[in-house]
Amino acid sequence: MPKKRASASSSSQVLEEGSADDFSGSSSKASASSSVSTTDDRINADANNNEEEENNGESNNTSKRSKTRKKRKVQTDYCEEVKLNTSITIDSNSLDYTEDKPPLNDFFDYRNYLEKTIIALDIGSSFVKGAKFKVINSKSKPSVTSVQMKFDTHQFYPSRIFCKTSGSTKFLVAEKAPENDGWKELENIKKLFLVQEALAIKVNNEKVTVSNAIYHFIKELLTKSITKKSQVNGKVVSELSNVSAFILTCPTGTTENIKKVYRNCLMKALASFEVDLDFEHLYVIEEFVLLKYYCDSQIDIVKEPTLYIDVGHLTLDISVVEFTEDGIPEITFKNGEVGGMSIVHKVIQSKYGEETLDILASQFESNSSSLIEELVPLEKEIEEALHQMMVPLCLIIVQKNIKTVHFAGAVTRCKYFETRFREILKKESIQDILDERRCYFKDQYKDIDAFDFNLNWTVDGLSALITGVEMIINSSIYATGEVPLTIGKNLDSNFDYHVGILDEWQKEYAINLDIAAYDMYAIQDFEIFILKFNAMFDLKKCSRIDQHNYNLMGISEFERFTTVELCIDGESILTTNPTFIVTSSVDLKAVHVNIYFKKRSLFAKSILKILRNGRLERIAVNDAVKTIFLTKESDEFTWYGSKYITKFYLTGCKANRIDESTVLIEFGDDTAMLDKLYSHKKSTLLTSLPEITEGDNEKVRKDMGSSCVACGLPIPDMATKYEVTPPVFHEYSFHLDEISKCGYICTGCHQTFKERKKGLRKSKKKKSKNKSKTKNKE
């Protein structure tokens, strides 16, 4: 893979996503060619002179501008920064406001709830389960009683929420979709948690705040759970009035801030039933913590690497716990992006349509290790789906040297699924999985083999997480005091993150890792993904991923990030080689994209920094083949309504010029890519690029507009324009506060720039002269 240099961000330009950049095209090809060359030479000369003057002289203290500005270095790696346009303001009355809220509860103490009622809700991606607990204060030892909650007579209630935005926004929690027009089903609760930091989703082109949807969801569930009311002082009071504490589950890995938002939603929902509980009695507990309490109660705890698996009706959550030298447990790996039973649902949907729960319910009721009659024709596809579910888990077991595996969740109650999963998790089956992928392993893992481990298959009649709540209460009673509700995280950084760049070759899609080459068109696009790989895999052995080798590459997380729509102004680039190369890298805050091309016969590089905040479209790693390679996804918007397209205008005045030695360093030994960049005809300058759609060249010039980047006014005569290019960007922004990006400026603003620069020169000379006089007098 090529070596990459981190892009400079000190002078990053901030663009709102989806808006056209204000760089103009020339009115004629001849004037464009002339303007690019003469303006570049003239301004570059000014920059060199000014840099020398700044190094030799000092600022004039009597100059207003020099008092407030520091000397700046000429920028060589100009970078543009793109962020999502989030226009929602959080006020102090909003459910999303958490600044002055008390901290979350990190401990539980049963002594606060003697002879009192505690309600717990497990809100899963498919079903909601609940229970009421009471701590009995007996003379010998306190004990816990529990009663399963019902929602409209159901112990398992579908966690489906529908929204209607015509007029005022309305929400409905129901088993099936309403017949009335206008209702749209929202994504499952776990997906809503993923986009909570984006604050809002779009439903029928209307913004709906996520916290408001979650509040109504909880409120509707509580309404369905109330079975009796009573008269107190002439007032009707629900049975919720006796509740002293409330516990909600949330997905593993939920941030502290989102937990507080969730708690705000719960408090408001309870207030609608006139239940007044302080924050200290509202608990938001990650699913993994409850799962660990439940599983650890089944067997003796061994302080060795342990894998916890929760297979629900739709999702599959996994967490790895390892222990410090002092015996303190830490989460070292977690992943909620592995497709669970949703993969099986899709197989059944392919034959029977949308509603699959009834068919699977029949399979769960069967006590046979074979499929029911309706599913026998799909046996091969279902077994393949179950195998896909387990492969990422098997790789984690080997990589982390797992000694005990706890298997829990809804599917543990089904004999057929238990039989199949036990088969896949056998040592011999895992060995086959390793052998199939061994050619892609790093050298230190090439001889690794499967090994035996303890498999604890835990079956619970209601919900492992609800039982986990009961285990927390019992643990507190056993400890005669408080017990922890959190587990420290020391997430393993021994994973490789790469940027996947989608391209198409011979009518088949594939993902290139970190680098890709494209023919240059006036308008074109390429999609970007963020991929996390198991540390055992050597990606140098396969830099291109397609539907045939995808499942062999050890991908542990998959995030759809954005589609870059590249609009290229051929008149300002005047390339000799209609090819460009994209290299990319990723960190916690942004994806960095470098675009290499030929400007005239010289090498050039444009840099784009795309912020990650608010981009959250993750997909199940073991379901990506169909989603990415075989299905055409919507490229314009994400499922939660944010724009998926990042528009970037590639123009000559925004290009960083680089020399040949820099190109050789940055591309390293990737000779194939170097050959693509080197091939050109020196005598040919392309003023117009090839078009995918007729008229694209003209569209680019029109969309870029002809406004001055300093004053914002239209440039009346583009033949008289000046260019703010990367080498002189800081020089211009030093003298013109209005300039925040490279582009064209009008004659008037350029004249102002020259006058201010000239004034600075005079002040420096005057100060230097005064210093000389002072020295002579001394």
Image: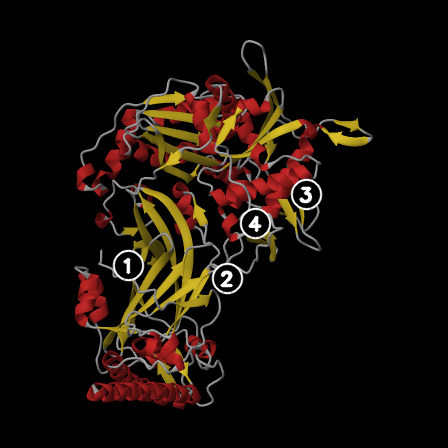
Which of the 4 image quadrants contains residue 296? Answer: top left
Label 3 – label 4 distance at C-alpha: 32 Å
Report the residue marked by disc 4: 97
Colour setup of the view: secondary structure
Above or below, 363 against 640 in this view is: above
Whether label 2 touches label 1, CB < 8 Å:
no
Report the residue marked by disc 3: 178
Dot 2 crowding, Cα within 10 Å, few <14, some 14–19, many 20+: few
Q: Secondary structure at mark 4?
A: loop
Q: Nearer the viewer, mark 2 or mark 1?
A: 2
Q: For the C terminus, which image quadrant?
A: bottom left
Q: Which mark is residue 224?
A: none
Query: Which label's residue is closer to the chain start, 2 or 1?
Result: 2
Q: Which mark is residue 515?
A: 1
Amino acid at the residue labelled 1? Ile
Amino acid at the residue labelled 3? Pro
Q: Nearer the viewer, mark 1 or mark 4?
A: 4
Which of the 4 image quadrants contains residue 765? Answer: bottom left
The image position of residue 187, as x and y in percent, is 55, 45
Q: Secondary structure at mark 2?
A: loop
Q: Nearer the viewer, mark 2 or mark 4?
A: 4
Query: Which label's residue is closer to the chain start, 3 or 1?
Result: 3
Above or below, 744 against 477 in this view is: below
